[in-house]
Amino acid sequence: MNKPNPFISLCISMLLFACGTTSSPTDLLNDNAEINDAHSYANIKDIRTTHLHLEIEVDFENKIIQGVARHTMSKHECDTAIFDIKALDIKKITLGKKGSEKETDFDIGDEDQWLGRPLEVLINSDTKYINIYYQTTEKTEAIDWLAPSQTTGKELPFMYTQGQAILTRSWIPLQDSPANRITYSAEVNVPSELFAIMSADNPTEKNQEGIYRFEMKQKIPSYLIALAVGDLKYTSLGENCGIYSEPRLSAACKYEFEDLPKMISAAENLYGDYRWDQFDMVILPYSFPFGGMENPRLTFANPTLLAGDQSLVSVVAHELAHSWSGNLVTNATWDDFWLNEGFTVYFENRIMEELYGKEVADILAVIESQELALTLEDMENGEHPEDTRLKLELDARNPDEGLTDIAYVKGAFFLRTLEQRVGRKKFDAFLKEYFDHHAFETIGTEDFVKYLQAELLEPNNISDFNVDEWIYQPGLPANCVEITSKRLTRMGELAEDINDGENIFIGANTSMSRGDYVTQEWLAFIRALSTDLAPSDMAMIDDKLDFSRSANAVIKSEWYQLAIKTGYKDARPHMKKHLKLVGRRWLIGGIYQTLRDSKDKSDLPWAKSVFEEAKENYHFVSKSSVQEILYD
Ligand code: BES
Ligand code: ZN
């Protein structure tokens, strides 16, 4: 794969030395001069991609993508440009405009388990175009290739990519740091019966040739470049929004997500214009490892969101909120991940409040705070108690380890605590200005702290707010706002009654019909049930409420964990079906963990055997997480 050349002996420190920084200030990352991304090899402070043009073919037969990544580079004085690659086969690299290209030498450095390898390309100080010819391999981690049998329609194959955090480098050779923003365009060749869409401007109709052209005119970080190819149909939901899904799911999508236009208006009223023109979603196969992924203009979503009763739309509010927090204002490194997710959870909750009222928003926040409490306890007793700080230090680790309730929930509660201190009006004005001021830029935690001091705390004469404790200290500060919910408390009481041996379903004034409660109320109910319940008690509850066969995979996942702890084996066939269908990490990881930790020693072997059958239906991200849970 590597071409031998005299260039090999150059080490990275020498390369950096060889690069001057006298280029025009607009080209370089001067604003972020102090930012060091431990998760990228790219020398973006010296030379960086400003535009990426992809010419690729999606080959379903061989399960590879092949083609060329054409990079337009900033002005520079370098003789080397360093890119990130992982499990990619680099064929050749040329310099110059398409048509008048000249091959150049390159070197590929040693592999790091998480980062992949640095790709060092020999260039000249006047090099503007670098063209990397490549193909993906079986080891490519971003791409999920699905057989027709793994789709809803069962007739045509499907593929999609997942870039966040550092997997884009496994399907495109590029400078894979969120500190750099680029525009991109693409020409994508697919089998003519399939429809290709990207995180860019998309057609709404399939074409005959199987050639699709895309353009993303706004600057985005590399982790947001995304592609999906399958038997897709577009369903409009309003002027600037709609859903791509397999044709059979169109009607279900239309109903489930009908509030999307209202969510967009609510979000714009809160924090300013939606800056990406179009907000579409694509419903991927069940293997998609997340509930949602905020790829710009095209949120990727898991079909488990189609619960049939609009009960899981907070995920849509969440991904929509990322159009501001994350996509418009982006965390500079994965150590600053809370700036993406904490702001988004806060914003998601505000959208939910606008649409469904404060009671529902509070229920969501209370459930999250319960989860945070459990996470804190686990983490404080775990290998990395320092990870309970908002600002992380994930050097030499997988950045996905930052994907915890700390970034999401502690982050959101930090903002709620600030809101409580200054009042909602001032806090909203501050956030709106924050998004505006940093639009299409990246921001590190330190920049945020400075901005917070200058624009919110100082103008309001607040000098005693414990910002430092919130961001740089472990645990949850004592001044964290407390949110309560009578409705959730009531669910806890009902569960207690069952724990005490009462049959609440016979009680005079207790109606527990399924449609009367939001998902999180059922979660609270199930969580408050005792693990000492007898299997017969569990069967009685299941008989009334049918949790084992719920259409809501979030409720099912919670219920199955209790079923394991109580030894309620009647749930097993349903649990197995769930584990074999759904690849969303959050909905299967907890079940596998509970099986591993079960006091019934036959549960771990059972979990392993189910995993062996199920794993072909999981994306790399979920497969590797479950593998770790069961085998490490
Ligand atoms: N951007 C995240 C998913 C992600 C984070 C992928 C880090 C890879 C690395 C997405 O917005 C997300 O948070 N999804 C959640 C939604 C939930 C919190 C509402 C999910 O998938 O469960
Ligand atoms: Zn998110």
Image: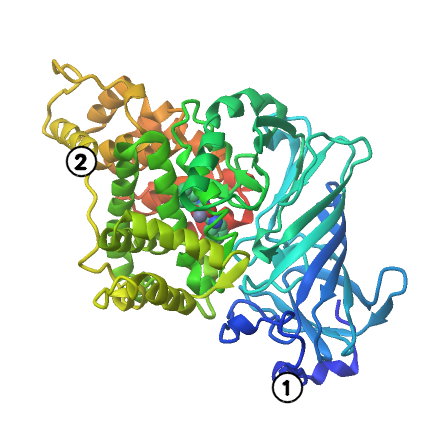
Q: What is the quadrant of residue 117 in the picture?
A: bottom right
The label number, if any, that marks residue 530 in the structure image: 2
Residue 275 place in picture, x, y as percent: 55, 46
Q: Identify the image quadrant of the N terminus.
A: bottom right
Q: What is the quadrant of residue 77 in the picture?
A: bottom right
Q: Is residue 409 visible?
A: no
Q: Is residue 255 left or right of residue 407?
A: right
Residue appearing at x 52%, y 43% in the figure: 274
Q: What is the quadrant of residue 9 in the picture?
A: bottom right
Residue extending farthest to the right is 100
What residue type is disc 1 on? Phe
Q: Is disc 1's CB within 8 Å of ligand 1?
A: no
Asked if the residue at tag 1 contacts the one at tag 2, i.e. Cβ–Cβ closer than 8 Å, the answer is: no
Secondary structure, mark 1, is: helix
Looking at the image, which is closer to me, 620 or 105?
105
Residue 537 place in picture, x, y as percent: 20, 25
Q: Is residue 342 left or right of residue 624?
A: left
Residue appearing at x 70%, y 47% in the figure: 215
Residue tagged 1: 17
